[in-house]
Amino acid sequence: MKPLSLRFVELCYNIRQFVEKVITMLRELFDIFMTPLRAMRLRYVPLLLIYFAYGSSVFVSIAKDFWVKKELSLSAEDLVALGVWLTVPWTV
């Protein structure tokens, strides 16, 4: 049986190897996600920000719909009908 100090040294070495592997994997993952961003031209950023803002407004819309449904005591069907009639002017 190995002495306690030797087992501790081996454990520390194994932990160090594990941490190094995890750091390597995280760096590779970071590079995978950053590659498209590094290749992007700066003139595309304003358009992408507009798309992002439009997409994130959906979350606010969901919260608004639940609030309107609760405060006006509407059913899901009434809420959908209200939404359709409110979006008609923008579709014309």
Image (cartoon, rainbow, N blue to C red):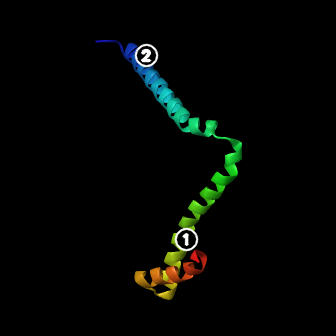
| Along the viewing direction, whichever of 28 and 18 lies nearer the viewer | 28
* Mark 2 crowdedness (10 Å alpha carbons): few <14, some 14-19, many ≥20: few
| Along the viewing direction, whichever of 2 and 36 lies nearer the viewer | 36
On screen, residue 14 versus residue 83, left or right, reads: left
Check the image and report above or below for 56 versus 67: above
Q: Residue at x 49, y 76 (%)?
A: 66
Q: Which residue is mark 1?
A: 61
Q: Which residue is mark 2?
A: 9
Where does the N terminus fall, quadrant-wise? top left
Q: Residue at x 46, y 25 (%)?
A: 21
- Amino acid carrying mark 1 in the image: Ser
Residue 39 percent across, percent down from the top left? 62, 36
Which sits earlier in the primary sequence, circle 2 or circle 1? 2
Check the image and report above or below for 63 versus 10: below
Query: Disc 2 vs disc 1: which is toward the camera?
Result: 1
SS type, badge 2? helix
Give the distance between the C-alpha atoms of the residues marked 2 and 1, in whole angstroms: 57 Å
Check the image and report above or below for 91 versus 40: below
Residue farthest front in this picture? 92
Image quadrant assignment for residue 40 = top right
* Mark 1 crowdedness (10 Å alpha carbons): few <14, some 14-19, many ≥20: few
SS type, badge 1? helix
Residue 8 percent across, percent down from the top left? 41, 19
- Amino acid carrying mark 2 in the image: Val
Q: Residue at x 54, y 35 (%)?
A: 30
Residue farthest left in this picture? 1
Where does the C terminus fall, quadrant-wise? bottom right
| Along the viewing direction, whichever of 18 and 3 lies nearer the viewer | 18
Q: Residue at x 60, y 62 (%)?
A: 54
Residue 84 percent across, percent down from the top left? 50, 80
Residue 21 has which mark? Answer: none
